Amino acid sequence: MTKAVIVGAVRSPIGRRGGALSGLHPVDLTAQVLNGLAREVGIEPENIDDVVWGCVSQVHEQAGDIARTAVLAAGWPLSVTGVTVDRQCGSSQQAVHFAAAGLVAGHYDVVVAGGTESMSWVPMGSPMGDRDAFGPAFTERFGSVPFQGDGAELIARTWGFTRRQMDELGLRSHELAAAAQDRGDFDDQIVPITLPDGSVFAQDEGVRRGGSLEKMGAIAPAFGADGLIAAGNASQISDGAAALLMTTQEKAEELGLRPLAVVHTAALAGDDPIMMLTAPIPATEKALKRSGLSLSDIGTFEFNEAFAAPLLAWLQEIGADPALVNPQGGAIALGHPLGASGARLMTTMVHRMQADGTRYGLQTMCEGGGQSNATILERA
């Protein structure tokens, strides 16, 4: 049976909103990451059939099929196509699923999957503007759709999480990310980005050091005076891009490429679009059932820390060992560039599995509309 394998995984360093990457056009950011991937793997771009690319806010500088635009900006041959995917925060994880399916079906020999989001250039919510994006039939069924932060508030109150519990998770994220930076864990996965002024940006800039629960507890709630969600227990608004080169085992051997991981299982799940962020629970259950693996078989997890509350709910319902989840920090510390986050998590997980000799890793994330992707990788 044909299997889809990952032979390369890179990412940009993640920039804060208004930070180091805020002066670089998102197309040029994407092009640099694509070229960094080709250099890392040692493949000529002419061998790549397609670029499947996640991006949530596909307007303004990220409009016009940014995947194809970036391919051309990177100087790749005109024969290399690109398509842009939107499954909200899971867009680039979905890009991996689409790429894997295309490889197994024989539609591709070699494909890039990944994503980008420059939230400094195109703020969250820009595609909707002041228009009604949902329409009367949806509204009649569900009412008005809250912001994702309101969904996190609902989760916190439904599961009974305290502000302190969520702040503890946020502090852990920063401490683990800082330790990973200090060890050089991210060095091999990061493509240094040349900025318009000629300087080079090479380290995630959202990680905060020297934090404490007292400092976090002093941060004002973000969604109402009596709210539980605050900046210390929520992901950062960020800029970044990430990319994975994928092929089949047979093609990898033909091209002399070393597989890093096999896409073992891919699953999707939907849940309440108002609470919105709980679908990783059924997605994980579905992925485990489909894979034939048990929870104890999974040696590492990546769960996107859009907010602390959905991760805490997932931990409680799934029963995963917290020590195995986001052991190098998550989006609360590293940032959450929406369309890039799925590929960023997977890049980090692939490199960790290689370094630690972990056989199976599972990644999942909450997504707009009450959806979730879950992916199980097997180290090659």
Image: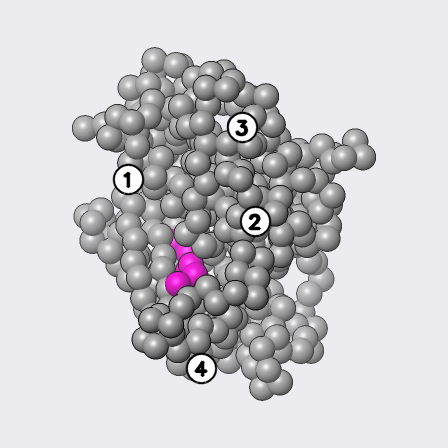
Q: Is residue 127 magenta?
A: no
- Of callouts 2 and 3, the N-terminal one: 2
Amino acid under label 3?
Answer: Val
Name which residue lies at 62% across and 68% down.
232
| Cα distance between the residues tagged 3 and 1 | 28 Å
- Of callouts 3 and 1, the N-terminal one: 3
| Cα distance between the residues tagged 4 and 1 | 35 Å
SS state under label 3: helix
Q: Visible in this render: residue 68?
A: yes
Disc 2 crowd rating (10 Å Cα; few below 14, some 14-19, many 20+) is some
Mark 3 and mark 2 in contact (Cβ < 8 Å)? no
- Of callouts 2 and 4, the N-terminal one: 2
Q: Answer left or right for 252 relative to 304.
A: left
Residue 293 image point, x, y percent: 23, 49
The residue that label 3 is drawn on is 71
SS state under label 4: helix
Residue 30: image quadrant is top right
Bounds of the magenta span? 364-369
SS state under label 2: loop
Mark 1 and mark 4 in contact (Cβ < 8 Å)? no
Mark 2 and mark 1 in contact (Cβ < 8 Å)? no
Residue closest to the far right: 197
Name which residue lies at 59% across and 21% down.
75
Which mark, by number, is residue 157? 4
Amino acid under label 2?
Answer: Val
The residue that label 1 is drawn on is 264
| Cα distance between the residues tagged 2 and 4 | 35 Å
> Which quarter of the image is occupied by the N terminus?
top left
Residue 210: image quadrant is bottom right
| Cα distance between the residues tagged 1 and 2 | 34 Å
